[in-house]
Amino acid sequence: MAVFADIEEELTLWYQKILEGNREKISKLIQDGSDVLDALTDLYRGIGVTKNHVKDTFLQTGLDGKPFDAFDMVDSKKFAFHLRKISKPTLIVANKVDVEGADKNFNRLRERYNDSIVIPVSGDSEFSLRRAEQKGLIKYSPGSEEFEILKSEDLTEKQVNALNFIKKGIMGEYMRTGVQFAINVAVFKLLKMNSIYPVANEDDLTDKKGRVLPDLILLKDGATINDLAKEIHTDLIKGLLYGKDLKYNLRLPIDYQLRDRDVVSLVSAAKKQ
């Protein structure tokens, strides 16, 4: 627990150091007519901070009505703490819940950091299930809440005991091993990414090689058709006309904001020729 707290504190101090080291620069930009949100966004842009992150930080801290030059060290620490929390949200992965006594440690961790997401994980159980699945002994998909034994006659007594423990001690207590779930929470909940399926053939949803929905591209919430084209290939942007939502057969403008699990075809001037 102490290590986790130390890491968060180090990140906050890093954010504060960036701010304190650029006070004169920010003040001058504001005096020259720049908006404080734009000035601070540019300052932190290199570490993935957006204008919305800065705006939300001001609102949460109550510093939105205070002149930047009036910020004292307490204000800058508060700003840094909340900006880090918003722009770099924390997910605590509590691994080794399969170890005896881990349930008590997990509950203590969850109580201590009740403002963070804490996910119980058994990496060893996930590894065992994947190995058994690769050998054809069980049927299991990463993230599933259950597995099916296919060849019980090929299992040793040790393997049977291990699988029974995973079924009762891990999945029975925590629903899943937690590995894939932790990844999904980090990507889709904390980072707010959307999964987009681009396809070349509108009729059978395949790429040029005939593979059905072969690609999945993760884009940040608010990403547009234009952003999708840029992610696939920069040349697509030059002649991009519009996108097509293949679920509902709708034409989408290039500034349309994509939603999670959209299946999209891109139409460019090159395609039309």
Image (cartoon, rainbow, N blue to C red):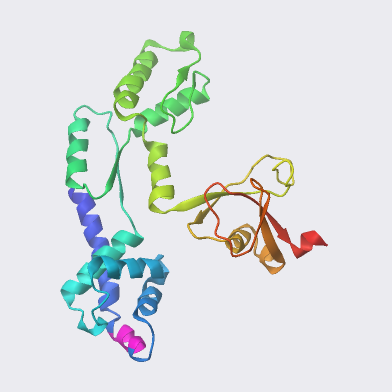
Residue 51 at least partly seen: yes
Does the magenta run of residues contain 29? yes
Q: Is residue 82 above or below residue 119?
A: below
For the C terminus, the quadrant is bottom right
Q: Is 238 placed left or right of 141 in the picture?
A: right
Q: Is residue 234 above or below residue 131?
A: below
Residue 149 placed where, x, y %?
Answer: 46, 16
Residue 14 at least partly seen: no
User: Which residue lies at the image location 46% right of the left edge and 22% below the top edge?
Assistant: 132
Residue 76 placed where, x, y %?
Answer: 22, 73
Residue placed most toward the observer, 264 or 144: 264
Determine the image quadrant of residue 82: bottom left
List the single residue furthest toward the bottom.
32
Determine the image quadrant of residue 191: bottom left
Magenta span main SS = helix
Magenta residues span: 24-30
User: Which residue lies at the image location 43% right of the left edge and 49% below the top edge?
Assistant: 187
Q: Is 142 placed left or right of 8 in the picture?
A: right
Residue 113 placed where, x, y %?
Answer: 21, 48
User: Which residue lies at the image location 34% right of the left edge and 86% below the top edge?
Assistant: 30
List the single residue furthest toward the top.
153
Residue placed most toward the observer, 16 or 254: 254
